[in-house]
Amino acid sequence: MRMRRVGTVVGALMTALLLLGLAAPEASAHAALLKTTPQDSQILDTQPTEVTLTYGEAVTIGLGQLKVVTADGDRVDTGVPTQSAGGTEVHIPLKSGLAQGSYLVIWRVVSADSHPVSGAFTFSVGKESGDLKDRLGRGNLTSLTAAPRAPSIALGTTRFFGFSALLVFLGGAIFCLLLWPAGVPRIRGMLLGAAVVESVMAALALFLEGPYAAGEGLSNTFDSRLLSSVSSTKYGEATGTRIVIAAVAALAVLVVGKRASKASAGLLAAMGLFMAMTWSAAGHAGVGDWEPWTDLLDTTHLVFVSAWVGGLVVLVRGLRSWTEDEQAALLPGWSRLAASSVALLVATGVFATLREVREIGALFSTKYGIYLVVKYALVGLMLLFALVGRSFVRSHYTHPPAAGEEDSESTVATLRRSVGIEASLAVVVVAVTALLVNTVPAKDAFAPPYTGKSAAGPYTVAVDIYPARKGVNGLHVYTVLTSSGLTKDVAEVSGYIQKKGSSDRITVNPPLKSTGHYEDLDVVLPGKGSYVIDLQIRANDLDSYETKQTFEVK
């Protein structure tokens, strides 16, 4: 039986690590590039003195890379990039006397929630030097900003073990504080191990954030320059604080862990709470709308999760050593604590889901949404096994058993198995949570394609824009004779796309792809918001019709 339990836990741990390895996202972020000056593919009469990048939130440039190069790879930027407008605008100064031709801008910055964002675009001075995009290819443009995956996987692994340690430490302390003050010395080793793991994982995360954010390899993990840059960010401050708190918590366990008292348990629970606060400050909850209230709510959510999951770990240990009297004294209280924690963590979790998802469609069409659905499914399975345990406690402890019925070892073994499976599922849930923290929220990644129709003289014009999001999009225009419903070629489809409130226009002139179908797969939209596409449908040399449609970029 013992080997079976060990096998269950090892299997859950291996599943969790496999998830982190296979599904760990490449470096990606939550700050959106709204505008560039010059614009992508723009041909300028005279060279600019700088390249300006405008983002939707403040970014950090110390860990990134910002450069402008020729088609041959020679750098033409100079000096040190600067920021303005509260950190939302980045300026890259250029050398004077640039030759006519095309230039490639490669950029990588770090968003407010510690995740890097990167990209590339081109502009030309005087004329294009060939077609730089065709020479490099869209795939190669992407590869220029791609980062090694090893730092991302390593950072996700530290997050998994660190988060697990938090749940064990805080949950164990809460269990002792509310139900079992005498148990502090008995789980002292577990609490000490959790505090040490938390401190070590936070230290590793602090070092790994540098190469992860800078797009460099693991060989730069202990680069003092990167560490210095990370330490000055909000993520670095929160993680550094966690290292200290966890180390102090380990010392507190050594000092007060021998005392079986509520005061000892309360002190340790307070240390765990402070650790939880640093997790919230360094993650999605620490940035965006409704902050700092989201910090508070996220920390509250972590407390309830810890009370449930950490309590399960104590229960797994206790059911192997508690006497029947201890079981009778502790299990009813645990049942009530677990039920309350689950109800409250669900309530706070729903709020977090609404904030990070916003739309139902995002649950099934984004990585974040899919991970969230998987997490909810696993939590649902945990609840089923929790109901088995709650039923056992109610029938054997809340209500005395009928005459002649006594608790047997085989009956208690049923509870042990149920709790063991519940705890093993929690391991996988923690792994999925670690992935969620490192994944672009669904509300930012969700971009339903646009499809619309409008009239243009005798034609019905159907417009498809896919994926209708920041960056490169495909534009499809179909010219259909309204009278017959059949697609028909016209002499030319041209026009522009303009973001509402902006004076910048994106010229479009999609070439004929097939009968009545005009296609341009390289339309670059600078950011989120409402756009108008204004098209001229030139049927022949005499007849031309205008049509407009409005669409949203998520």
Image (spheres, rainbow, N blue to C red):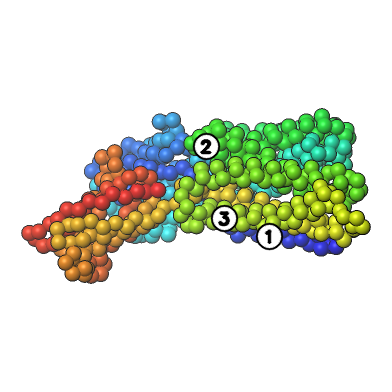
Of the two numbered discs 3 and 1 on the same chain, state the one appearing first in sequence: 1
The residue at 76%/46% (across/down) is: 335
The residue at 23%/59% (across/down) is: 461
Q: Distance between the residues labelled 3 and 1?
A: 17 Å
Indicate left or right for 479 with 444 as reference.
left
Label 2 neighbour load within 10 Å: few <14, some 14-19, many 20+: many
The residue at 22%/51% (across/down) is: 548
Whether label 3 touches label 2, CB < 8 Å: no
* Residue found at the far left of this picture: 542
Point out residue 187 in the picture as x, y percentages from the top left corner: 84, 42
**Is residue 194 visible to us here?**
no
Q: How far apart are marks 3 and 2 (CA)?
A: 23 Å
Point out residue 302 in the picture as x, y percentages from the top left corner: 66, 41
- Mark number, residue 287: 2
Point out residue 222 in the picture as x, y percentages from the top left corner: 65, 43
Circle nearer the viewer, 3 or 2 = 3
Q: Distance between the residues labelled 2 and 1?
A: 31 Å
Q: Which amino acid does label 1 sit on?
A: Thr
- Mark number, residue 15: 1
Q: In which quarter of the image is residue 269?
A: top right
Residue identified by numbered label 3:
373
Of the two numbered discs 3 and 2 on the same chain, state the one appearing first in sequence: 2
